[in-house]
Amino acid sequence: MWRDPGTPADSYYQVREECSDVPQSKFRIKAGKTLSARKWNSAFSPEGRLDIGKILGRIHRGGVHPSIRGEVWEFLLGCFDPNSTFDEREQIRQRRRLKYARLKEECHQMFSLIGSGSFVTAPVITEDGQPTQDPLVLNQIRGYS
């Protein structure tokens, strides 16, 4: 798929039904131009510093292979400094995971269904911020407690 020249990028990902009126992308995958995992890994110094200039052109010309897309976007979105090392990025990841766990626990203290894997399909508070008194919603919430 990624080696097929001229293949529309839209064909690789499923488009949701409610988005069917969106025009087709004009971006075409160019054979050999996609940023591969090998090229991505070769852009790092031994300490883990990224030569971002080395990869931006390739991304612009051919996109990013799906297997490394998440890692690449962490740099493109500014989550990591290209001059950071492997160890610095791992420390940042660990701090973010701890912060996420703390925030999730705080939310769970406010509303016990948060983080439980269950979900409620109706608002649990009214527009003025007060808890809902709707019996259907209350029954749904009690069913998960």
Image (cartoon, helix red, strand yellow):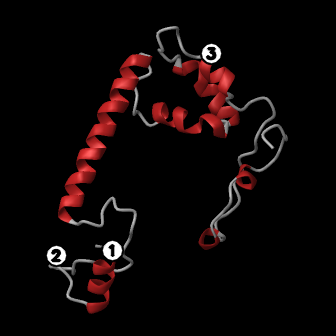
In the current view of this chain or complex, which residue is farthest to the top? 46
Q: How many marks?
A: 3
Which quadrant would residue 139 be assigned to in this image?
bottom left
Position of residue 137 measured from the top left corner of the image (x, y, whole percent) = 30, 85
- Drawn side of residue 66 relative to residue 71, left or right: right
Q: Secondary structure at mark 2?
A: loop
N-term-proximal mark, 1 vs 2 = 2
Q: Nearer the viewer, residue 125 or 115?
A: 115
Q: Amino acid at mark 3?
A: Ser
Asked if labels 2 and 1 touch by Cβ distance under 8 angstroms, the answer is no
- Drawn side of residue 22 relative to residue 45, left or right: right
Q: Secondary structure at mark 1?
A: helix
Crowding near the residue tagged with mark 2, few <14, some 14–19, many ≥20 C-alpha atoms within 10 Å: few
Task: Name the residue at 79% across, 29% down.
Answer: 32
Closer to us: mark 1 or mark 3? 1
Task: Name the residue at 36% across, 75% down.
Answer: 120
From the image, tell me which residue sits under label 2.
Answer: 129
| Numbered label attached to residue 144 | 1
| Numbered label attached to residue 42 | 3
Q: Is residue 62 above or below residue 145?
A: above
Crowding near the residue tagged with mark 1, few <14, some 14–19, many ≥20 C-alpha atoms within 10 Å: few
Closer to us: mark 1 or mark 2? 1
Q: Nearer the viewer, residue 64 or 101?
A: 101
Q: Amino acid at mark 2?
A: Gly
